[in-house]
Amino acid sequence: MQLIKLYYENNEIHSSDITYPLEDVLKVFNSCFPEKMTIELLKEFSNICIFTLYEKELPIGMFWLERKTRDVSFMTSFAIIPSHQRKGIGSKLFQCLPAIINITDTECILFDVQKENKGSVASYEAQKNCKKLDVMNKCFICSVKGF
Ligand SMILES: CC(C)(COP(=O)(O)OP(=O)(O)OC[C@H]1O[C@@H](n2cnc3c(N)ncnc32)[C@H](O)[C@@H]1OP(=O)(O)O)[C@@H](O)C(=O)NCCC(=O)NCCS
């Protein structure tokens, strides 16, 4: 498992080489999703890269990337903590994905979003670099291109 720390400062997002405790991932995940994540469960996801976004020392957002092929990564758990939602931070993080794609040397990020998660669907629809590809089961499959 790889951990990449991102900083949100002056309306910009920067990456850093500094690592951080897995407990910070739990803080964000457990405040944003109904499922409960534990350190033990987290450690089972060995093949992922977790990006955690900080404002000063507070973890405020996250997403995970899992490499599927040489060119394609799958994104899950994209989230901003409730106290920081609807302030444009999720959009900013989304806009940074092409730069992050460069860090991870992947061409394309795929992700799915449940159709009934109306807030997330609206949030992704608002993003210029997000393309809806398909509908499978109850999910939209979307892609983010690295350009
Ligand atoms: C989805 C999520 C990451 C959006 O992050 P955010 O920082 O709040 O998003 P933004 O402030 O950049 O919102 C951008 C636009 O998306 C739309 N949007 C975002 N959240 C919305 C909501 N709950 N309802 C309706 N529209 C919403 C709006 O058009 C918004 O623009 P506006 O605030 O000017 O109206 C955040 O709501 C979240 O973490 N949700 C819980 C976790 C989750 O479900 N993640 C997605 C898993 S697929």
Image (tube, grey):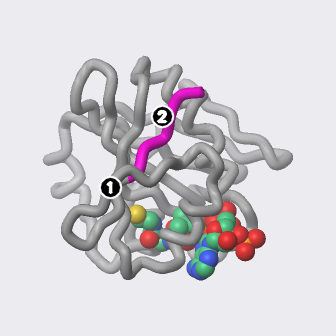
Q: Identify the residue under disc 2.
A: 4
Q: Is residue 145 left or right of residue 35?
A: right
Write the start and end of the magenta stretch as one range. 142-147
**Where does the image place residue 55, in percent across and percent down from the top left?**
69, 53
Q: In front: 46, or 68?
A: 68
| Amino acid at dot 1 | Asp
Q: Identify the residue under disc 1.
A: 134
Quadrant showing the N terminus: top left
Label 2, ligand 1: CB separation under 8 Å: no
Alpha carbons under labels 1 and 2: distance apart: 30 Å
Residue 90, by quadrant, is bottom right
Instruction: Please name which of the two marks, 1 or 2, marks the residue nearer to the observer.
Output: 1
**Where does the image place residue 144, in percent across and percent down from the top left?**
49, 40
Answer few, some or many: residues within 10 Å of disc 2's Cα (few below 14, many 20 plus, some between 14 and 19): some
Q: In front: 139, or 64?
A: 139
Residue 5, by quadrant, is top right
Identity of the residue furthest to the right in this view = 10
Reading the chain from its start, which is encountered first: label 1 or label 2?
2
